[in-house]
Image (spheres, coloured by chain):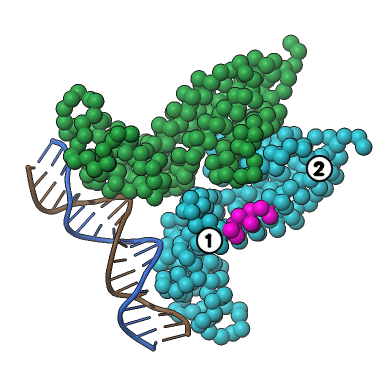
Chain colours: A green, B cyan, C brown, D blue
Amino acid sequence: MAEREHGYGVAVGESSGGSIYGDAGARRRRTLDAAAALLDEGGYSALTIRSVAKRAGTSTGLIYQYFADKQDIFMALLDENIVESTKAVAALPRDRGVTALVAAIIDESARRWGRLGRMSQVWRDAEGAADMERESLRAVHDSGTRYDEAVLEAVTEAAAKEGRVLRGETAVLPFLLSGMQGVAASIVNNWASYLDSDEFAQFSAAALTRAVTRTEPAP
Amino acid sequence: MAEREHGYGVAVGESSGGSIYGDAGARRRRTLDAAAALLDEGGYSALTIRSVAKRAGTSTGLIYQYFADKQDIFMALLDENIVESTKAVAALPRDRGVTALVAAIIDESARRWGRLGRMSQVWRDAEGAADMERESLRAVHDSGTRYDEAVLEAVTEAAAKEGRVLRGETAVLPFLLSGMQGVAASIVNNWASYLDSDEFAQFSAAALTRAVTRTEPAP
DNA sequence: ACCTGAACACCGTTCAAGT
DNA sequence: ACCTGAACACCGTTCAAGT
């Protein structure tokens, strides 16, 4: 917030009080923070290597010592965001019903999508580029898997508290995830602008709940 | 298909047999065709103004006489695609049940999304750029509205043939559209790779049908 | 009048040169 | 040893110059 825009040289962080010279970890962190800030402020087009370097207090050349390329920076940002979302989902209360839970997840998803939705394009490009070996790609993939698991756990628990269960088909979770994502994207892109977005999220959550759960069979 | 790759000068189309010199319509068409072909062959990164111009048999400068900028070309492509999708939806059979209809729409949507999904990013950037007046943006918006209407009509009719009706809430259509879009995106991005994509589409179509229709109340 | 393509102001990325 | 930033090969866009 009070970060200097035209700071001269390296603004020392709250680390062990000295120079950042040679500190790979700190520099990586600052680079990521700078990239995230630029993305928030000016959108995708404001995110250039030169401006990231300036804001992070490094040089363009040095950035390439910590990241393979620009895509790699996005990937790292995306990964951190998914990890955060996973924590948020895991922390959601289970005792207010499946619909309320799903609505909350849609909300979270819309927030993340608003910031990093464009990332999915980058992600797809990266996958297409045949360098699946890339660590950052594996990281995003793994984090995504953990996110999916967190959603499954949360929904299962919330359903149980209502005396309901998830349907048994394999496609139930992918469908729920896709549906929530689609609704979140719609909200962010403001399609259905004639609709109150809370009302839309609420209806969608209820509809998805109807679609993926059923009342528990008597034991 | 048999289009010349290194054609010299202007390859005359099936128009009135003469030069294309000064023919704005034809040049616009060729530019769009070239852009679509490049997009299909090399993805987003292959789509440069220089290569579009070369392939279309024009110059970079002339392209800017028919399109405001690169974004405008995408917009026109997107618009044509939505119009085609609308026709496809309108032509879908109504007598095989809502689920089959929805599955077919998801299929169509996945095909379109695979080619132009990235477009949604461009679209959002364009909207953000405050030049809502832009004709190409209005066109896409209007075409989108007509697509939505076509889906509504198709689903309503298919439901009626099964003795069902759409639920009455305003959010029903946006939810259905978002859900189908989300599922289509998942299929294209190959999330849920462990699942057969037909099975996934089928389950999703059935789930969405459950969520948005109910049996018709006795008259 | 219509069209071209060199020129401009960028971009991501590299690597010789500095400290 | 570590870091910088000019240089390279692009990009979208414009506009003087050609026909």
User: Is B26 located above or below residue D18 in the figure?
Assistant: above
Residue linked to disc 2: B159
CA distance for labels 1 and 2: 38 Å
Few, some or many residues within 10 Å of mark 2 (<14, 14–19, 20+): many
| Residue at x 45%, y 39% (from the top left corner) | A115
**Magenta stretch bounds:** B138-147
Q: Is residue B205 visible?
A: no
Q: Is residue A193 left or right of residue B39?
A: right
Quarter of the view holding residue A190? top right
Quarter of the view holding residue A136? top left
x and y percentages locating residue A44 in the rendered image: 41, 47
x and y percentages locating residue A123 in the rendered image: 45, 43
Residue linked to disc 1: B134
| Residue at x 62%, y 18% (from the top left corner) | A96
x and y percentages locating residue B106 in the rendered image: 66, 45
Q: What element carries label 1?
A: loop
Amino acid of disc 1: Arg
Q: Is residue A118 left or right of residue A207?
A: left
Quarter of the view holding residue D19? bottom left
Q: Upstream in the sequence, badge 1 or badge 2?
A: 1
Tally of marks:
2
Residue nearest the observer in this picture, B26 or A110: A110
Amino acid of disc 2: Ala
Q: Can residue B134 be seen in this view?
A: yes
| Chain at tag 1 | B
x and y percentages locating residue B6 in the rendered image: 44, 73
User: Is A106 located above or below residue A191 in the figure?
Assistant: above
